[in-house]
Amino acid sequence: MPRLGDVAKTAVLHYSCSECGYSTGRWLGRCPGCASFGTLAEEALPAANGQAEAKPLLRLAEVEVNEAERIPTGVPELDRVLGGGLVPASLVLVGGEPGVGKSTLLLMALAAISRDRRALLVTGEESTAQVKLRAARLGGAEQVEILAETNLEAVCATLERERPDVCVIDSVQTLYSADIGSAPGSVGQVREAAARLLRVGKEAGVALFLVGHVTKDGSVAGPRVLEHLVDCVLQFEGDRYHAHRILRAAKNRFGSTNELGIFEMTGTGLQGVPDPSAIFGRSEGEVGAAVACALEGTRPLLLEIQALVSPTDLAMPRRVATGVDPKRLAMIVAVLSRHAGLALGQADVFVNVAGGVRIDEPGADLAIALAIASAARGAPVRAGTASFGEIGLTGRLRPATQAERRAQECAKLGLAAVIVSAGTEARAKVELVKAETLARAVSAALDRAKKEAA
Ligand code: TYD
Ligand code: MG
């Protein structure tokens, strides 16, 4: 019988969660990290061997920074989300559901980058011929170099030898290292691939885009386990049945995470949408629709909020939110019931943001409330009117940030009026309809509509 001390330290068995990457020494039915059931899978980690040497220290003042020039990707919307272009030798994770357009976006970027720099595409999903067909549709990608490879060691060795300026790995889930026992796409493999690419990328000066698929049910090892490792996490959203796609940064070490990139999928690739308000913010005086002027990063965005209020016998009426935080919706419904005299206790309330956009900004509260009020009362919001403002639990309206920017966006899009909170000041060529409380805002928005119709 060997004693524990004699057991060779070749491999240590670990269990790690395919959802969140939580790692533990014993198997558990429920992951303590994310509370999912049955997601812990066995995985062998290479044993640590040898002792590490002490390293010399530096003071921050001695650290040399070459204020590295950013690499323009040739896709202005992508540049903006990255914080003004791609930082050399950075590691960017691009996540999104299959079919959303990740490969298309990154091939377009590589095509533009390849005009002045070396751009490499490592494809593990599509054959070189398939990539060529796609490239022909997009045009201008003749100088992009391509490698069809799924072996992690081979990819790293190639990057070290070739040292391209930018490399796209499509996708990180297809990479496979023989050192790790688990299957390609498992958390262990994905994490190892990202960690090694990070090292190689920084050493060889290669800026890397890692494509990572996320599915709604999370059946593929989520790229979420990589989020702490990479410099930027970009999410590409939008369903494949709508033409519009939204790119946002969930994490960015080199810029703000508030910027949005908006694209339209066309027959010849993704087209940036420089003026999204014109597309998302149109509302033709329909019952149950209100235009919000929300702020996404530095960019004000007009969005149409749609609501449906329908009577129900359910003891717990439904509150269904698409593109809006459900908790926020519940709060707005409660304030409408309590302080604006709307009886919503026996009604299902559905709210949707048009165009598949998601808003998580309190400035959009007022428009959500007005859309619900319009649906409940059966009266349209006054035509050509947008709104912004935060709703407090007491039914009072609070000013939203950057009021002037928002009001100017409304003026730019030719709106006549904006309903705002009483304290809001803004210089813009649009009428500011000020309301102290939500109840006043509702009557200002709906009563005028009735008067106009009469
Ligand atoms: P793709 O980039 O392959 O998505 P992902 O890499 O995220 O899985 O593209 C997805 C869809 O986009 C595909 O179904 C076809 C469509 N598409 C266009 O509509 N126009 C185009 O020019 C291209 C290249 C793709
Ligand atoms: Mg793809």
Image (cartoon, rainbow, N blue to C red):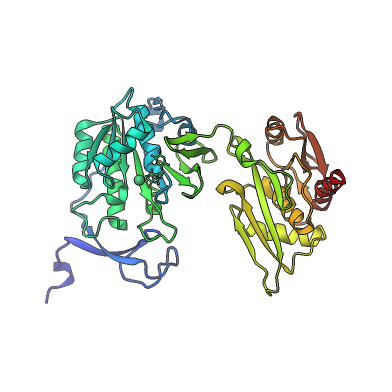
Q: Is residue 152 above or below residue 201?
A: below
Report how many numbered discs are placed on residues in the image. Answer: 0
Ligand 1 image position (quadrant): top left
Q: Position of residue 189 (x, y in %)?
A: 27, 54
Q: Position of residue 227 (x, y in %)?
A: 41, 49
Residue 273 shows in this picture: yes
Identify the residue at the far bottom of this view: 1
Identified at 26% across, 49% down, the residue is 175
Residue 170 falls in image quadrant: top left
**In-image side of 222 versus 450 (left or right):** left
Q: Position of residue 433 (x, y in %)?
A: 81, 40
Image height of 37 relative to 387, above or below? below
Closest to the observer, 301 or 273: 273
The residue most toward the left is 1
Query: Would residue 93 be visible to someone looking at this image?
Result: no
Residue at image position (38%, 55%) is 222
Question: Which residue lies at the image location 50% right of the left edge and 48% below the top edge?
Answer: 238
Q: State the quadrant of the N terminus.
A: bottom left
Q: Considering depth in this image, is 286 or 297 the residue closer to the camera?
A: 286
At a point 40% along the width and 30% down the height, the residue shown is 73
Residues 5 and 342: in front is: 342
Q: Position of residue 434 (x, y in %)?
A: 82, 41
Q: Quadrant of residue 425?
A: top right
